[in-house]
Amino acid sequence: MADRRVHNSIGERFDIESTRHEDPIRRVRRQVCWVVAVIMAVGVIFMVWEGDNQIFQARPVAGPHRLFDDKCEQCHHTSFHLLQRTLGIDSADFQHGCKQCHSDDAADHHPAAMTEGMMDDCTACHKEHQGDADLTLVTDQHCLRCHRDLASSRTAGEGHFVSSITSLADHPEMALLREESLPESSHGVHQVAEWLDGQWQDRGRLVFNHDFHMDPRGISLPPDHRDYDPGKKSPWMKKLACADCHQADDEGAYMKPVSYENHCKQCHQLYFSRKLATVHRESVDTMNPLPHEPAELIRGVLRDRLMDYIQQHPEELALPVERPVDPSKPGSLPTAKNNWDWVEQHLPRMEGQLFATGPAAGQGDLKYGCQLCHQTERQPRPDARVDWKIVEPRVPARWLSHARFRHDRHDTKITLDGENPFACTECHDVKTTSFSGRDDTGSVRAGDILMPSIEVCRQCHGGRLETSSGAAADRCTECHRYHPAEPAGTAQDAALLDYIHKSIANQSSGK
Amino acid sequence: MAFFRFSRPAGNSPCSVYDGLCCLVYTPVLSDAVPVIIDKTHRTWAILSIVALAVLAGLYGWYCMVSPDGPRGGSLPGLAFGILAAALMVFAGLLAARKKMPRWRLGTASWWLKGHIWLSLLSLPATLFHTGFRFGGPLGQGLMWVYLVVMVSGVVGLLIQQYVPRLMKVTLPEQAIFEQLPVVTRGLRETADDHVAGVCGSLFADPEEEGAEGFEPQRILRSFYLKTARPFLAEAVPEGSPLLNPTQSQGVFAQLGEALPEQMLTAVQAVEQVVDERRQLISQLKLQRWLHGWLVVHVPISIALLVLGVTHIVTAVYF
């Protein structure tokens, strides 16, 4: 049988209308395309109409901002800003809306950083939409933008800071401990210290001996001290610890200022004269100390007590009065004519014993005047009298103003041996020696600076976990702040609370 | 330059699709016997794409090093990568438009196809550099997954386009024009009918022959043809037909030949030839569906990619 395929006509062998029929695969493809396009368009319209902007976020916002993460306009005040900036038609003052909650009073680290356009917006360093990340943890690279080469990134003429810092490893020594002076006009170290005798010394004007107070054998207690215990073998001795005077603030970050009332008064009662201390008191057991007040108030108190005394003992009017304290000029003054004259004759001597230093100091019958702890100034008057003034102590409340620190987080350290307490003296080098065998290695001067060296910090920060040291982060932000401390209770709190209240109200009403 | 040649199977008997794929997998030999899509004309595109990839990777590496907070899509370098990736995707999508406008003198279709392939591949690293190898939020994740489906389907389609035509050429010597398959199938069926009718007298049994001696071979042949072979020659092939497998088909026809007298063997062989050709047409249909069916995934998902991409760009720029 012949093969028909050879002999049949073309019309019988081929479907000449095949080109008029659409390929079924192509038809299915076209239909699926339409379906997909419609579904996608409807989906996008639905997303936009619903108004849930979280769908469009690159990543979730940080936890503190979750309250309004569906309201992009809270932070993004300007639309199409990126396009405007690219085309050069945006406002130069554009910033994200951070400052409507975060205080507008927060100063920045250095004005040069703002004027040179390095950080013209909070988002230059604080990147949102990173998920639940801590926005305050800024990477070191932001700091190193300037501090890697400080000389070329700021105005000229301010060369007192180290020009290049790249990590904690090459961080310079604390200015307080450096063996070089720094210009007073531009470095914060002058707020707490002064350059004397080739080293930095405490700028405070108190007289204090750490070594004496930290004697391992203890210090003598007066009988009326709260820790005086007659039941003990040595009731009059107490070994002081750092925490007896240095106590952390409520946050645990820094130490509260040492105050006379809280820390010194128990031992150092201002009993200058038994005679004046027992005025209006029945016995020496109830002596009335002088108040811890400025010199002019002390003068007033002394005058009152002298007056009270001479009124109680009028017979002493006839006694000669010793000259005011001045061993170079022995002799006595004429007897007083009246009580007031008697008071005015005795007052300068009393003041001298209280405030003067040198041989005239501490000659009261109970010893020790203000000059035991304070520096005093002598201010001669035209009438040959002397006014005394106690030099303001000016004990620094904060030593390293360029850094931040939390003492509470340094209570213990985690090493290979486990968690161990962190002694104060591990950082603050106050060597104590026995009183009798003192070799002057302890801090005997108030001018001694007992702040730790940067090497102490490096033992843990950036170090490896060892038996003697822990391992802690060494980021710039561990110790330094870009924004100085904000004042408390400002617009930040008010704005945030206001927003929270409104949000709660809206949720309750179903909005 | 062709990368592989398929070794021809023994004799000239056509392979099944399975046999063809086995040839593809197990017997590759360097040869330029069969033309392929990715050939030596793609060399320039490949080199330029590799160079571009190296440059982009270097830029990305430098960007990662200098960026304080790591790579981000919203940074200027990140945006640059994103714009580049979008431009590459748009170019890739314009291939469809170019096909609709064959008279446009904007490069040949071949050039556009090469650009579509290589620039689409280049868009993948550009996209990853833009995202910083992250998938982002809900819209970003959806966009990224859609994009990956488009890319994977495209690569699958490229591989299909690369190997299936050659497979068809080697394993299906009797293939016909795809649109003419129904007509050709009908012709094969008529031919086979003629062969069987020629020796059996008729495809339908004569009642007088039932039970009569001497007509057994015709009954056998007719029965086999009507029950097994002819359904195989219909438009819709029954599932499980023994004739789908060439080895099995060969055995069936050998067995049939032993049961029939010699004068009927010629017809049997002719029917076997028709069945073989029909088998090739079935294979051709399957491969043709693979050859074009992958676009049913690739093209619609590309439209989804387009819609989501525009949404992403607008919302990102808006805020």
Image (cartoon, rainbow, N blue to C red):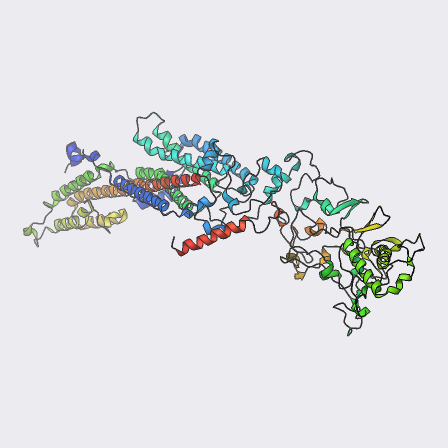
At 64% across and 40% down in the image, what residue appears? A147
Q: Residue at x 72, y 46 (%)?
A: A191
Seen at 78% across and 58% down, the residue is: A301
Quadrant containing the C terminus of chain B is: top left
Residue B92 location, quadrant: top left
Q: Nearer the viewer, residue A500 or B288?
A: A500
- Left or right: residue A128 compared with residue A413: left
Indicate whether B225 appears above or below B124.
below
* Horizontal relation, residue B1 to residue A266: left or right: left
Q: Residue furthest left?
A: B208
Q: Residue at x 18, y 40 (%)?
A: B188
Residue B262 placed where, x, y %?
Answer: 17, 46
Image quadrant in which you'd find residue A187: top right
Rendered location of residue A195, percent (x, y) = 78, 44
**Is residue A376 in view from this perspective?**
no
| Viewer-nearest residue: B174 or B117 | B117
